[in-house]
Image (cartoon, grey):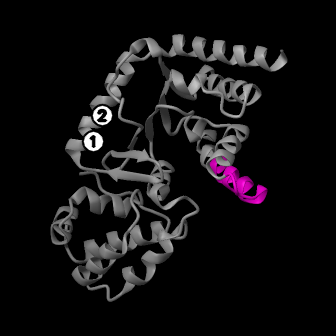
């Protein structure tokens, strides 16, 4: 298993815990697998804690303090790493997404958050939270746009998105908002910052009829899979489960339109929305 990378302890509480965990484990003469066995988790799970791709939970903090003889260091500090601006069910996935080298994402009904425009995100949040104040909605939109800034890096992460045609056809926020959003997606694809494929209605049944799927790969930790529902989500690292979902995404890629044909369709639908807007 690749060794964990050196982290800057000042960068975040999660990075501090990861660096300290690595130091305490090596000081105890334990491998990741040996420490994992004492906590009844995998060695890769320990690696994810050390690399900062997984947040430390209180129950593991207590066990680590006991096994590694660190008094109450991890117990005292895991609370700081648990604070997040994201919903609880999505927080760990968002943190992992920020350090992933490759992200592969399928979402059946919406344009993924990393590709949304402010207008599209605002329309969603106003629908999800009809009683929220303008200030609350503005904050939610700002947090989503902050997530999307990871695409400002010209090469990392590699983002491969399979868009269901339903996401193109459902007019979130109206014609003007949809035209702007699809033009944004098309621009990212045209300058080769993302790879996007459209899963057309004509494909009929497909391998991910059950819901959304996000796979995240890292330089120094095993692949994680995130599946999500209404106000719920699960971050999965079981190798067999991840392998099965890797196959699912590969089947989606094989069923979807090619990237060039997908770009043509996205631009065509955007043009249709623009015509609707003017008329």
Main secondary structure type of the part rendered in magenta: helix
Decide whether residue 167 is among the magenta residues.
no
Q: Give the image quarter of residue 178.
A: top right
Q: Against 64, is 159 above or below?
A: above
Is label 1 in a helix, a strand or a loop?
helix
Residue position marked by numbered label 1 in the rendering: 242
Residue at figure coordinates x 41%, y 72% from the top left: 17
Q: Residues within 10 Å of mark 1 (few under 14, many from 20)?
A: some
What is the residue that sits farthest to the front in this orientation?
131
Q: Is residue 275 left or right of residue 76?
A: right
What residue sits 53% from the left and 70% below the top?
83
Residues 42 and 165: in front is: 165
Spatial distance from mark 1 to mark 2, Cα to Cα? Answer: 6 Å
User: Label 2's element?
Assistant: helix
Residue 234 x/y as whole percent:
37, 52
Vertical order, 32 against 79 (above or below):
above
Describe residue 114's horizontal placement relative to residue 70 as left or right.
right
Q: Which residues are magenta?
A: 130-146
- Find disc 2 in the rendering and name its residue: 246
Verify CB contact (< 8 Å) between mark 1 and mark 2. Answer: yes
Q: Residue at x 23, y 51 (%)?
A: 1
């Amino acid at each position: 298993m690749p060794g964990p990378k050196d982290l800057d302890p000042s960068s975040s509480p999660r990075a501090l815990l990861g660096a300290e965990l690595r130091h305490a484990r090596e000081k105890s003469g334990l491998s990741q697998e040996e420490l994992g066995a004492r906590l009844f988790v995998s060695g890769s799970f320990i690696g994810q804690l050390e690399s900062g791709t997984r947040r430390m939970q209180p129950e593991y903090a207590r066990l680590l303090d006991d096994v590694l003889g660190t008094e109450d260091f991890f117990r005292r500090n895991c609370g700081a790493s648990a604070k997040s601006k994201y919903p609880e069910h999505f927080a760990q996935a968002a943190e992992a997404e920020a350090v992933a080298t490759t992200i592969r994402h399928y979402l059946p009904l919406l344009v993924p958050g990393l590709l949304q425009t402010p207008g599209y995100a605002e329309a969603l949040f106003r629908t999800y939270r009809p009683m929220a104040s303008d200030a609350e909605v503005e904050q939610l939109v700002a947090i989503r746009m902050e997530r999307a800034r990871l695409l400002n890096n010209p090469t990392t992460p590699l983002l491969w998105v399979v868009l269901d045609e339903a996401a193109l056809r459902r007019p979130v926020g109206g014609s003007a908002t949809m035209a702007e959003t699809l033009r944004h997606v098309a621009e990212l694809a045209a300058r080769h910052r993302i790879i996007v494929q459209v899963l057309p209605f004509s494909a009929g049944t497909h391998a991910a009829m059950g819901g959304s799927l996000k796979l995240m790969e890292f330089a120094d930790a095993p692949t994680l899979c995130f599946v999500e529902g209404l106000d719920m989500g699960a971050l999965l690292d079981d190798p067999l489960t991840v392998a099965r979902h890797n196959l699912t995404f590969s089947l989606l890629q094989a069923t979807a339109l090619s990237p060039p044909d997908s770009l043509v369709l996205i631009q065509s639908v955007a043009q249709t929305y623009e015509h609707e807007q003017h008329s």
